[in-house]
Image (cartoon, rainbow, N blue to C red):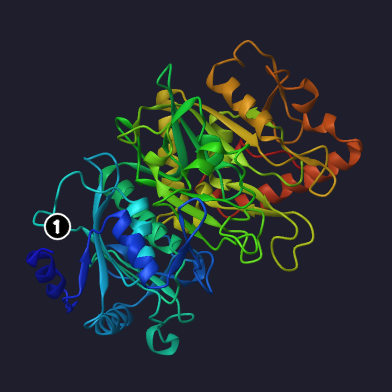
Amino acid sequence: MSVKILDQLKSINIKTDNVLYNLSHAELVEEVIKNNEGVFSESGAIACNTGKFTGRSPKDKFIVKDGDSEKNVWWGDVNHPLSTEHFENIYSKMKEFLLEKKIYVRDVMAGADINNNLKIRVINTLAYHNLFCLNMFISPEKNINDDFLPEFTIICIPEFEGKPLENGLRQGNFTIINFTQKIILIGGSAYTGEIKKGIFSVLHYILPLKKDVLSLHSSANIGKKDNDTALFFGLSGTGKTTLSTDPNRLLIGDDEHGWGKDGVFNFEGGCYAKVIGLSDEDEPEIFEAIRFGALLENVVFFQGTRKVNYDDKSITENTRVSYPIEYIPNSVKPSIGGIPKNIFFLTADAFGVLPPISKLTIGQAMYHFISGYTAKLAGTEMGVTEPQTTFSACFGQAFLSLHPTIYAEMLGKKIKEYKVNVWLVNTGWSGGSYGKGQRMKLKLTRSLITAALENKFESIKFNSHDVFNILVPESCPEVPSEMLDPKNTWENKEEYDDIANKLAKAFVENFNNFKDFANEEILAGAPKTI
């Protein structure tokens, strides 16, 4: 343990000599077991329960409103302001809480591109949180005890709850970002996703504003043969991680990327995959990655065993695993790719309206990027009895620090400059809405994406969709032609037209929030409504 690290911690008034610094996977697993934070699963992965919070709490994410942040941040439902005074009060109390406590400190980086990375120091009170950070961020190649100067610091104390009336909070849990002091404070929640998404929000602020790099909530992979890079956008449950983890391509990353002048680079050093319904047959790469060093969250074992029941959602549907990206055999290191040739917008359309694949014009691409559509399924939340439209700007609204149009304009410029193909892929339902139709088979979706990547649609005729105006191919290798036009898969064609029009109206209504910032090309990408 370096004296310099202790001195650096004391310089920000974190006063404890009980510091465990940059522990290995094996050492952290030992700590998790010793602290009774988790147990071994049959595969060798550690399984932990995050307690009350099994997902992020977007309404409890705050940004300190001062200086540059006041004029640059997209304030509103996504980014809630907190005063400097309230921040200082919470920060002071958190440092008091850590007096003489055992803490886990880790120095890591976000960003595989050495010209655009962010040096981070993470301070945890839980060993499995530090294990998560070891899996999810990028560890410097060399021993950096004496050289590492963090550009941002995360202090995560799940046991510490804020007092709402005293501190300007909504409730006891919080994530607070201070761009001036370069600190993230997390308290009251043990959900590890708050750590990684806190840094994602920081990168969403710094990279576009300071470095002209587009930050993206996307997965990415690269072709083994042609070295072609592809991006996959999509909200949770649309297949972003699954479809980018392709045995025939090399994985760059499954969730967060930047697009700079030389191409795409991963922000992370690992993957954070949903495991609800996971099977060895459908997702063998992810299944095999769940081994020693991986961290399972909120899963349930078969009774009397340590074998995970991946279909059990009694704790949450948001069961997760984190693991280093090198656990995926087909991953590329460093996690960098070239300029994308294809972009896929993934949507799990539970209304069964959108085609399995369609090609977008530049205007439509920008319209759908700003819309960020998917559909929430009946039964996943209390009171939801039929599919619910969900729109999330840039396919990651909860993490945007700047106005969505800033990211959209940057993406549109790159699509035009590099002549990128943009595809809308429905990984949801066909032949009817959820409850009547059937979910798209993963094998079918992979065939469609492979056809796009291998330029097999170049000689195929496309027809314009009656409502959404998007271009639908008439045929595709290894895919039944009748599947490609969604209306053909419905028994009741009038019902299809009715639901398609309702969905189109929902798109238009949602886009009213952005239309004042959109140019004519983007507005022309809107669907028709009756």
Residue 514 in the image: above or below residue 99: above
- 80 left or right of 302? left
The residue located at (43%, 16%) in the rendering is 225
Residue with the mark numbered 1: 149
Counting other residues with Cα less than 10 Å from the Cα at mark 1, is it few (<14), some (14-19), or many (20 or more)? some
Residue type at mark 1?
A: Leu
Residue 126 in the image: above or below residue 13: above
- 47 left or right of 423? left
Q: Position of residue 89 (x, y in %)?
A: 29, 84
Foreground: 70 or 184? 184
Q: Position of residue 8 (x, y in %)?
A: 12, 68
Residue 155, quarter of picture: bottom left
Quarter of the image with the N terminus is: bottom left
Q: Position of residue 306 (x, y in %)?
A: 56, 59
Residue 216 in the image: above or below residue 32: above
The residue located at (16%, 71%) in the rendering is 9
The reply to whether residue 259 is in sight is yes
Q: Secondary structure at mark 1?
A: loop
Residue 284 in the image: above or below residue 224: below
| Total marks placed | 1
User: Of all residues shown, which one is farthest toward the bottom?
Assistant: 166
User: Of all residues shown, which one is farthest toward the top?
Assistant: 459
